[in-house]
Each structure stands twice: as C-alpha cells, then as structure tokens.
Amino acid sequence: DDDDDDDLGETTRPFVLGVLPGSKAAKLQVMAPYFSAVIDAHRELVRGEDAAPPPPSAAAAAAGAAAAAAGGGTSGGVEYVIPLSPTVSLEELQSFLDPESNELIERLGWATGTLHALDESAAEAATVEPLRLRGARTIAWLETRGGGRVWVMRAADDDDDDD
C-alpha cells in the first residue's frame, strides 16, 4: 500500500518541475536568474494571483506553458528542482543569482535568489523537509526573490564536494 495514493488510486505526490540552467558559466549567468524569474511567475499563475512586477515576456510565456502543463490554476502541489551539474559548485550558482556579481539581473529585470545549503541538523529538526526523488539527493534549496523554494539536487552517486 503506497502512502502517496488516496482511496481512488490517484496520486497525491507533487508535480515536479525541473529547470536546467546549464553547466557553463555563460549559460548560468543568463539562465539562473531567468529561471528564478520564471519560477516566481509560475508560482503566481498556479496560485491565481497577479504578479507584482510583470516578468519579461519570454519568462511569462515559459511560465504560462509550464502552468498549463501543471494543470492551470491549481494551488500548491508543485515542487521546483534544479538538477545541478557536478561541474557547478553551490558558490558558483549563488554568484550568478547575485546582482553584485551578475549585471544581467538588474539590466534585464530578472530575479535574484539565495542558496541555503541543506544542513542535516535543519532536516532533523524538521525545519526543512527536503524533496526526495529516486536517484537524486537534495544538497541545497534556492529561495527566489518572490519566496519560491527550488530544490537543488545532484545525482545520488555523485561524490563531489558540495561546499
């Protein structure tokens, strides 16, 4: 008996939306803040709220397509994931989300984000319940400017240092 299924056999597991910002500096500089903005826009769409500052039109189109795939105006139930390349450190990812080190954020009006390394004590204290996916381990979470939480994951067999 699977705890994630209700009596009707329907799943209650979250819809997982993965974003792939790339593994090279040039792509991460553009895509990390872009996807942070898209996630904020998507969260607004699935909750049925008006977005405070409108995202760039490309971000709005991408978020709209993702919201349609997620079932339109349903609230909650969506988990956002970045499967981080083993060639990218958490420090590098954070630098691309920092407007002081990435001028594209201000120039294009995209979103910032703050990375939080997953601390075993936080998980044990139940202050953070990380998303669990088969074949992956959660190493951090990204808090977007709009308050979204994005799980940063690596392959479960990736032994690289994350800090």
Image (cartoon, helix red, strand yellow):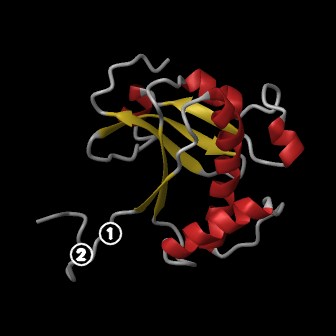
In the figure, is residue 135 to the left or right of 102? left
Seen at 60% across and 33% down, the residue is 115
Q: Residue pushed farthest bottom?
A: 8
In the rendered image, which quarter is residue 142 located in? top right
Image x and y of residue 19, in percent: 53, 49
Amino acid carrying mark 1 in the image: Thr
Question: What is the secondary structure assignment of the residue under circle 2?
Answer: loop
Binning the other alpha carbons within 10 Å of mark 2 as few (below 14), some (14 to 19) or many (20 upward) gives: few
Question: Considering the image in quadrants, where does the N terminus appear?
Answer: bottom left
Q: Nearer the viewer, residue 152 or 77?
A: 152
Give the number of callouts: 2
Q: Is residue 6 above or below residue 3?
A: below
Q: Is residue 74 above or below residue 34?
A: below
Image x and y of residue 121, in percent: 40, 27
In the figure, is residue 36 to the left or right of 18? right
Where does label 2 land, which residue?
6
Seen at 84% across and 60% down, the residue is 53
**Could you tell me if the residues under marks 2 and 1 are in contact, i.e. CB atoms within 8 Å?**
yes
Mark seen at residue 12: 1
Seen at 64% across and 65% down, the residue is 63
Image x and y of residue 49, in percent: 70, 73
Which numbered disc flags the more N-terminal residue, 2 or 1? 2
Question: What is the secondary structure assignment of the residue under circle 1?
Answer: loop
Seen at 53% across and 45% down, the residue is 20
Amino acid carrying mark 2 in the image: Asp
